[in-house]
């Protein structure tokens, strides 16, 4: 099964660039795959959570290097990877949240990102050490059909990202 | 995408905060500042209208949890207006739909 890299994006570790990553990845997912809108929304939210964690990780380390967002695909899967150069973390040491009926639950304003990612994508893996963290999120899906009825993928280069940028991001 | 916030104080004792745009790591601080400002000015019953919100992630949830906690500490509350499935889903998958009172309209929210 061959895997193709759809796009690779490097964003400065600044909060305002999370919206750019959402726009680019959701545009690619919508265009190359016949994904239902709700699955695109799931992927966009999961990506936002991963990018937010990455940017906070860079901030914690005062790391100016960029965060890498990559989208790969094969016949059955869309794979989104977010790679940071932050201090890393131990997944086993993350606090578990009290039940929502427990008043102490409201003491947790943070730490919801990873549970949200786990809920929204079909598979997720976290690889982390003191050199950074890689979050790999997998959405299982079939490729879209081309106009001629053959199984095919749209050419990412055909996407008018500049226009999308003007419409949705630029002030 | 910026975040717009409009405050309507015509539903005494409720203060309605209508939010539009995307609530994420870049824009959530603006909402947090507004909620802190309102509570420090004496608002106790705050309704956050999310009907025009196009995107909400855990950073936004954190701001709403913080606002609710602060207001409940003042014997008040923060309630929500939201009918958008995409936004409601964020509350449902975190279980927070059971922690917040979520109404279908502002009128329902200010009716108590």
Image: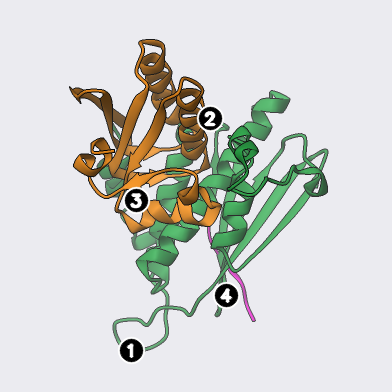
Chain colours: A green, B orange
* Residue occupying image coordinates x 34% and y 26%: B45
Task: Give the distance between the C-alpha atoms of the residues marked 4 and 1, in whole angstroms.
Answer: 19 Å
Q: Is residue A6 highlighted in magenta? A: yes
In the rendered image, which quarter contains the N terminus of chain A?
bottom right
Task: Give the distance between the C-alpha atoms of the residues marked 3 and 4, in whole angstroms.
Answer: 23 Å
Task: Write down the residue under mark 2.
Answer: A14
Badge 4 or badge 2: first in the primary sequence: 2
Assign a secondary structure to mark 3. helix
Badge 3 or badge 4: first in the primary sequence: 4
Q: Which residues are magenta?
A: A1-8
Q: Name the side, left or right, on which B39 lies relative to A168.
A: right
Badge 4 or badge 1: first in the primary sequence: 4
* Residue occupying image coordinates x 72% and y 35%: A86
In the rendered image, which quarter contains the C terminus of chain A?
top left
Task: Write down the residue under mark 1.
Answer: A149
Q: Residues within 10 Å of mark 4 (few under 14, many from 20)?
A: some
Task: Write down the residue under mark 3.
Answer: A161
Badge 2 or badge 3: first in the primary sequence: 2
Depth check, mark 2 against mark 3: the one in front is 2
Assign a secondary structure to mark 2. loop
Assign a secondary structure to mark 4. loop
Q: On what subunit does the disc labeled 2 rest?
A: A
């Amino acid at each position: 099964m061959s895997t193709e890299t759809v796009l690779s994006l490097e964003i400065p570790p600044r909060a305002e660039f999370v919206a750019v990553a959402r726009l680019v990845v959701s545009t690619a997912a919508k265009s190359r795959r016949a994904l239902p809108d709700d699955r695109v929304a799931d992927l966009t939210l999961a990506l936002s959570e991963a990018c937010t964690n990455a940017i906070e990780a860079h901030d914690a380390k005062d790391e100016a290097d960029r965060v890498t967002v990559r989208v790969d695909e094969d016949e059955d899967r869309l794979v989104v990877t977010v790679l940071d150069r932050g201090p890393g973390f131990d997944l086993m040491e993350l606090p578990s949240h009290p039940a929502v009926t427990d008043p102490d639950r409201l003491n947790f304003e943070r730490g919801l990102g990873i549970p949200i990612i786990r809920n929204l994508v079909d598979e997720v893996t976290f690889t982390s050490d003191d050199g950074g963290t890689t979050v790999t999120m997998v959405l299982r899906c079939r490729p879209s059909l081309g106009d001629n009825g053959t199984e095919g993928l749209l050419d990412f280069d055909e996407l008018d990202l500049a226009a999308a940028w003007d419409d949705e991001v630029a002030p | 995408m910026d975040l717009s916030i409009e405050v309507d104080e015509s539903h005494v004792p409720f203060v309605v905060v209508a939010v539009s745009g995307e609530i994420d790591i870049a824009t959530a601080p603006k909402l947090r500042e507004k909620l802190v400002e309102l509570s420090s000015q004496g608002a106790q019953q705050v309704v956050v209208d999310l009907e025009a919100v196009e995107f909400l992630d855990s950073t936004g949830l954190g701001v709403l949890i913080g606002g609710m906690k602060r207001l409940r500490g003042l014997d008040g509350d923060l309630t929500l207006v939201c009918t958008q499935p995409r936004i409601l889903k964020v509350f449902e998958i975190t279980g927070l739909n059971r922690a917040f009172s979520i109404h279908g309209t502002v009128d329902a929210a200010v009716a108590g």
